[in-house]
Image: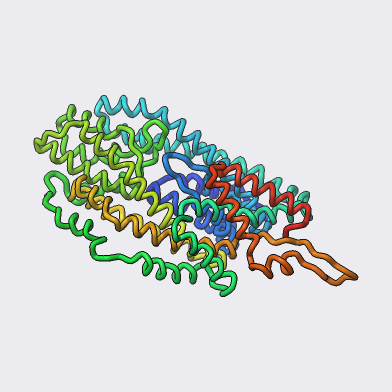
Amino acid sequence: MNISILQICLISLFYCFSNISWPFGSMGQWATINRPLVGGLVVGLILGNPVQGTIIGATINVIYLGLVSAGGSLPADSGMAGIMGTTFALIGGLDTNTALALAVPMGLVGAVIEVLTMTGQCMLIPLADKWIEQGKSKLVIWANTWIPYIVKSIIRFIIVFVILYFGSNALDSVTNALSGRVLDALSVMGGMLPAVGVGMMLLSIFKGNARWFLFLGFLATSFLGLNTIAVAFIFLIVAVLMVGFTESDFAGFKSIQQNNDLSYQYFTKKDLRHSWFMWHWFCESCYNYERMQGLGFCTAMIPLLRKIYKGDDEAMIAAMKRQSMFFNTDHDFGGMILGICASMEEQKRSGADIPDEAFVALKSGLMGPCAGIGDTLSQVVLLPVLSVIFINLATQGAVWAPIAYTVLFMAIFYGVGYWMLNVGYKSGGEAVLKLMESGIFDKVVKVANILGCAVCGALICSYVSFNWNVVMMREGVEVFNLQTGVFDAILPNMMPLLLTMGVYGLSKKGVKSSYITFGTMLLGFVLGLLGVIA
């Protein structure tokens, strides 16, 4: 099919929008509209084929199930992969496996763009510091939000527009030139790539007793024919019963609710909500290697600081300085730290002897543990589990699945985040540490590991394609088939399982994800060209 200039512009604009954290929030944006599951639907709507776009985007998303962004590292840009892979597949009439093969290089291009963006945004730090020294809080917000948004949106728009404009015009010729065995080899390569996503995901959850549930989920799908949704619900119940939750596990929550002696001195609930929204929307709008979320945290605190230090320029400048230092943590748990700092600013304004070092020490002490728990619960637990459920629905052509996934994730994400804000504000750092030291988070992670392993077992059967095509014929009659006669007879889906565990093994040994991805692509392409894999 042909693609118009208007469609190219709309897709380019959507890629820009998928990298802007308003109104979904930094984590919300990365987990929803920046995912191929959602991006495939949007591209399909723009190109007039939402059903096929949803199917292709959901299939591409399997590769990125194990994608975790921590400490500023991003091995691949799933947004670029989903948007470009779906676009090229639709305009070229390609199958989903070939779309996977095209998506991976685009994801690596997006990762390079992100690294350059984070490096370039370091240049805004001296400018922000200058405006902090001058007490110009509005310009500080500009340095953190609108300036980086405008610059990186222009760059991203141009890159995607150029790729689509020139790439789409040549795609038909390339597709025709690659028809036959080469195109079949690309399809084989794409069928093997989901093993990379599942294998990478196992790196975080394949541990302890949870490991056995990978094989139980695999067997449930191979022999009982259960789909991933059925496996998810069944093993969720099993995991909860195995781990067990007692009343003592929730003691930390009860102690926090009882420790609610702090009244609203200067801030109203509306003030805190405003600050919290600023945190969620803009905590990573100027994410950079020098301060990470530091400038974003200061931006979120500015509405509160303006209120309590109104008319005291010297105190306002000092407050912005201490709140703009290096900071990096999980988005939801970061809201809890925001609440604690808001409470401390109130107490300092009321005359409490709280030195600037106390703010820095508290943020430095809490950001690591909060990131460890928060990133695990959001990126290793919530995101993959929800993705698996709705990917399964989307690959069946359910265009409502990406929308339902987005709504459900955002409801959980925003609900937990707002609750964490109030926990931090009302309870203070000591009570928060007690909550984090309780065993409930560890039990939640154990449940998630069991559930995740079981679902990964089902995913291997459903999405990884690696079947031998070695057949012996005699007088036009098949007398031997390596796949059905040997491997399927021993264990159905045996080869996809071995391939996935191979990816996991290499990842555990420290082999770079990019090497594993390209190695899998090369293996699939060569075996596809030889015709021994179908």
- In the image, what residue occupies the spot 13% across and 48% down? 264
Expressed as whole percent of the image width and height from the top left, the position of residue 241 reads 37, 69
Expressed as whole percent of the image width and height from the top left, the position of residue 412 reads 35, 59
Q: Residue furthest toward the bottom?
A: 224
Q: Quadrant of residue 306?
A: top left
Whether residue 405 is visible, yes or no, is: no
Expressed as whole percent of the image width and height from the top left, the position of residue 195 reads 59, 55
Q: Is 141 displayed left or right of 116 in the figure?
A: left
Q: Is 431 displayed left or right of 44 in the figure?
A: left
Query: If the image is split into quadrants, where does the C terminus sit?
Result: bottom right
Whether residue 168 is visible, yes or no, is: yes
- In the image, what residue occupies the spot 67% across and 59% down? 466
Residue 175 higher or lower than 486, as above or below: above
Name the residue nearer the viewer: 82 or 185.
185
Query: If the image is split into quadrants, where does the N terminus sit?
Result: bottom right
Query: How many labels, in total?
Result: 0
Name the residue nearer the viewer: 485 or 43.
485
Q: Residue furthest toward the left?
A: 351
